[in-house]
Every structure is written in C-alpha cells, then in structure tokens.
C-alpha cells in the first residue's frame, strides 16, 4: 500500500517535519511530495483535495487524511515512542483539529518560510516523488 505525505514545501516547520519523519522511518514506508510540486498538484486533483488544505495531507492507499488525523496516522508508523501519539485519535477530530489549525495558521510566523521547496539529499531522493 502506498503511503504519501503531501507537505507545504515552502514552510520551514513542514520541511523540518519531513526530515523528522525520514529519521524515524528507517524502512521507508513514507514517500513525500510538496503541495507545490507537479506531483503534489496532480495528487490533490486526483484525490479531490480542497485548495484550503495547504499544510499536511496523508494519502494511504485510496484514503485521504488531513489535519490532526494525518499527523497521528503518520506517527503510528514511526519507530520509537512516537507511535504512542496515536492514542490521541480517541479525542474527537474537531477538538484535535483546533490545535492543528492554530499551529498551521501560525507556522510561517513562528518558523518562517522559504523562497522555494527543499531539495532532498542524494540519499533521500528516492523518498520524494518529485525531484
């Protein structure tokens, strides 16, 4: 089953999150594409993802997860104690998403923004769908 993370390629927090995931995903379960890339745009269109979802989207097979659910689903697949974060899935999505939206709304102010999407290292290149 294909597992793809779509992320905001110009957001410093999102780029740091991708690096965080790569370090804790030694088996390479997750592939990545920035939302601004050709592949990201195509996947958004194919999966009928609304334009206002602009920070972190997780595609698992034919399922699309957004906001806090996307984050928790990804954490579930990471090595170490991060998988325990998945227990927060029992909190109703609207409550979880309040925190997610607050962070997403402030991510550029708190962490900054890049002029262009990150370039993966040669070792990471096979994890990215658009390089």
Image: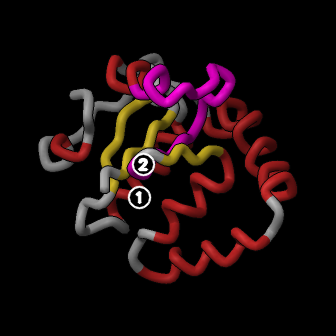
Q: Which mark is residue 96?
A: none
User: Which x, y percent locates residue 43?
Assistant: 41, 28
Position of residue 12 measured from the top left corner of the image (x, y, whole percent): 52, 37
- The residues colored magenta run 43-61
Q: Which residue is mark 2?
A: 18
Residue pointed to by mark 1: 21
Residue shown at the point (84%, 49%) measured from the top left: 98
Give yes or no for contact between labels 1 and 2 (Cβ–Cβ under 8 Å). yes
Tell me if residue 55 can be seen.
yes
Quadrant of the drawing holding the N terminus: bottom left
Left or right of 22 in this view: 27: left
In the figure, residue 92 lies in which quadrant?
bottom right
Looking at the rendered structure, the number of numbered marks drawn on it comes to: 2
Which picture quadrant has residue 15? top left
Asked if residue 16 shows in the view, the reply is no
Q: Position of residue 23 (x, y in %)?
A: 33, 63
Residue 42 colored in magenta in the image: no
Residue 53 pos. (x, y %): 64, 30
């Amino acid at each position: 089953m294909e597992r793809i993370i779509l992320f905001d390629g110009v957001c410093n927090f999102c780029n740091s999150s991708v690096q965080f995931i790569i370090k804790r995903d030694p088996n390479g379960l997750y592939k990545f594409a920035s939302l601004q890339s050709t592949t990201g745009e195509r996947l958004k269109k194919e999966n009928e993802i609304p334009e206002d979802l602009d920070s972190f989207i997780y595609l698992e097979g034919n399922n699309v997860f957004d906001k806090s659910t996307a984050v928790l689903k990804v954490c579930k697949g990471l090595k170490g104690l991060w998988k325990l974060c998945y227990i927060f899935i029992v909190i109703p999505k609207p409550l979880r998403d309040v925190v997610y939206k607050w962070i997403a709304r402030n991510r550029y102010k708190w962490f900054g923004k890049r002029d262009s999407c990150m370039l993966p290292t040669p070792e990471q290149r096979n994890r990215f769908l658009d390089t």
